[in-house]
Image (cartoon, grey):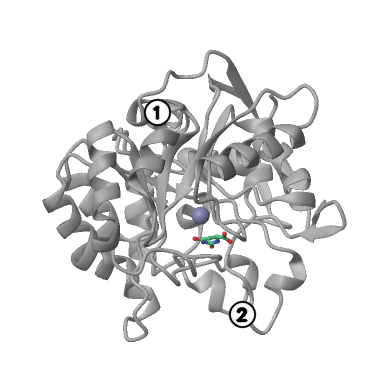
């Protein structure tokens, strides 16, 4: 059995880098493994225009540790009042790579999100025209829809009708968590793809709820029952170019997660590739890892693949219980567990 695996340098097609001291503490973890990342705009206040995205991009670049080459790809946070001309201007200027649809109230800092997709109809028409990717947080937010059904209901009520009306719009269905999500993406046209996180490949909802409530396994969309995890593993490792890597690494201070109302988000950036690779190895799909991690995303976004490579080597190591970002303690995904591959660089 081979002891090392070398692939084109991957990109992370969905990450939360935060801002300020947290940004400075976490960006190096992403930049160490990935050449580029689609950076989520759900800051407070959110990144809703070109000037804010450009300023945020500069803060990210200033926080990247010396010696690391990293290119943040910025996204525009859509609101009910987003101006289509601003989105077009940002895309044409190379500031916005994509725009992000958060249904209002779906997740962290989504209060200014979209209350009804009809309100951004012109923005979406513009995006379809210019070939700009729409990144979608695919969950409905109605109080009467069970949290475990919110993705499937979103497909039925929002995403399928939207794509029927705008059949050429490029959509990345972010962090899919369900069999319905996999099936929808597989049966859609080539303009529809999905990212898959490491946590949704490793854990089902039992990890969150059995033997005590485990806030570090809580993210949104929430992990679902086992059949969904298995569908996601088949999708990620099956070789289809419609599925690619997007960690959704979403750091929150330890005390904000270990709380009576804990924040959603799993901090997986420090060992993201090791985590994904464990899945590909268990599924006998090491030969498909490069496609998922490094090739399918650039192809969908119409960007070149990275010129350099990274190597992972076999060797067990234990993920630390805690990682600090400045003064803040973060509990990483897989804390205290042993993984079987190590990132060499
Ligand atoms: O778990 C999550 N955390 N899901 C999201 O959609 C947002 C993210 C965050 O920003 O914390
Ligand atoms: Zn996210």
Residue 92 numbered tag = 1
- Quadrant housing the C terminus: top right
Residue 165: % across, % down: 12, 52
Q: In which quadrant of this rendering is ligand 1 seen?
A: bottom right
- State the CA–CA distance, disc 1 to disc 2: 46 Å
| Residue 213 badge | 2
User: Which one is in front, 151 or 237?
Assistant: 151
For residue 77, say whether it is visible: yes
Secondary structure of residue under mark 2: loop
Left or right, 323 with reference to 16: right
Q: Secondary structure at mark 1?
A: helix
Q: Nearest the camera: 277 or 243?
A: 243
The quarter of the rendered structure image containing the N terminus is top right
| Residue 308 in the image: above or below residue 215 | above
The crowd level at tag 2 (other Cα within 10 Å; few <14, some 14-19, many 20+) is few
Q: Residue at x 41, y 25 (%)?
A: 295
Q: Position of residue 282 (x, y in %)?
A: 47, 43
Count of labels in the image:
2
> Could you tell whether 147 is left or right of 9 in the image?
left
> In the image shown, does 276 or 124 lie closer to the viewer?
124
**Residue shown at 39% from the left, 53% from the top:** 82
Q: Position of residue 307 (x, y in %)?
A: 53, 13
What residue is at 12 percent from the left and 52 percent from the top? Answer: 164
Counting residues from the start of the chain, the first of labels 1 and 2 encountered is: 1
| Marks 1, 2: nearer the viewer | 1
Indicate left or right for 67 with 302 as reference: right
């Amino acid at each position: 059995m081979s002891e090392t695996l070398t692939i084109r340098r991957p990109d992370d097609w969905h990450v939360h880098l935060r801002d300020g001291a947290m940004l400075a503490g976490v960006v190096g973890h992403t930049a160490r493994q990935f050449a580029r990342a689609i950076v989520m705009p759900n800051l407070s206040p959110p990144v809703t225009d070109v000037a804010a995205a450009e300023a945020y991009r500069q803060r990210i670049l200033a926080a990247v540790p010396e010696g690391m080459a990293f290119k943040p790809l910025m996204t525009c946070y859509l609101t009910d009042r987003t101006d289509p001309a601003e989105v077009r201007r940002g895309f044409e200027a190379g500031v916005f790579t994509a725009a992000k649809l958060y249904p209002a109230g779906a997740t962290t800092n989504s209060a200014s999100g979209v209350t009804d997709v009809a309100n951004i109809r012109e923005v979406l028409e513009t995006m379809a025209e210019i070939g700009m990717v729409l990144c979608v947080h695919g969950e409905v937010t109605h109080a009467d829809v069970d949290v475990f059904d919110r993705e499937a209901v979103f497909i039925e009520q929002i995403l399928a009708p939207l794509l029927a009306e705008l059949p050429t719009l490029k959509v990345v269905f972010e962090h899919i968590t369900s069999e319905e999500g996999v099936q929808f993406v597989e049966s859609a046209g080539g303009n529809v793809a999905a990212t898959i996180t490491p946590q949704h490949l490793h854990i089902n909802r039992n990890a969150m709820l059995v033997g005590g409530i485990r806030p570090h396994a809580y993210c949104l969309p929430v992990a679902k029952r086992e059949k969904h995890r298995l569908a996601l593993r088949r999708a990620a490792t099956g070789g289809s170019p419609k599925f690619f890597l997007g960690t959704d690494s979403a750091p929150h201070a330890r005390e904000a997660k270990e709380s009576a109302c804990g924040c959603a988000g799993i901090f997986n950036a420090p060992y993201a590739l090791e985590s994904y690779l464990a899945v590909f190895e268990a599924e006998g799909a090491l030969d498909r890892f490069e496609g998922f991690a490094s090739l399918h995303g650039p192809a969908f976004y119409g960007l070149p693949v990275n010129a350099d490579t990274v190597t992972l080597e076999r060797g067990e190591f234990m993920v630390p219980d805690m990682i600090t970002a400045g003064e803040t303690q973060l509990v990483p995904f897989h804390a205290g567990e042993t993984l079987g591959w190590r990132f060499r660089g």
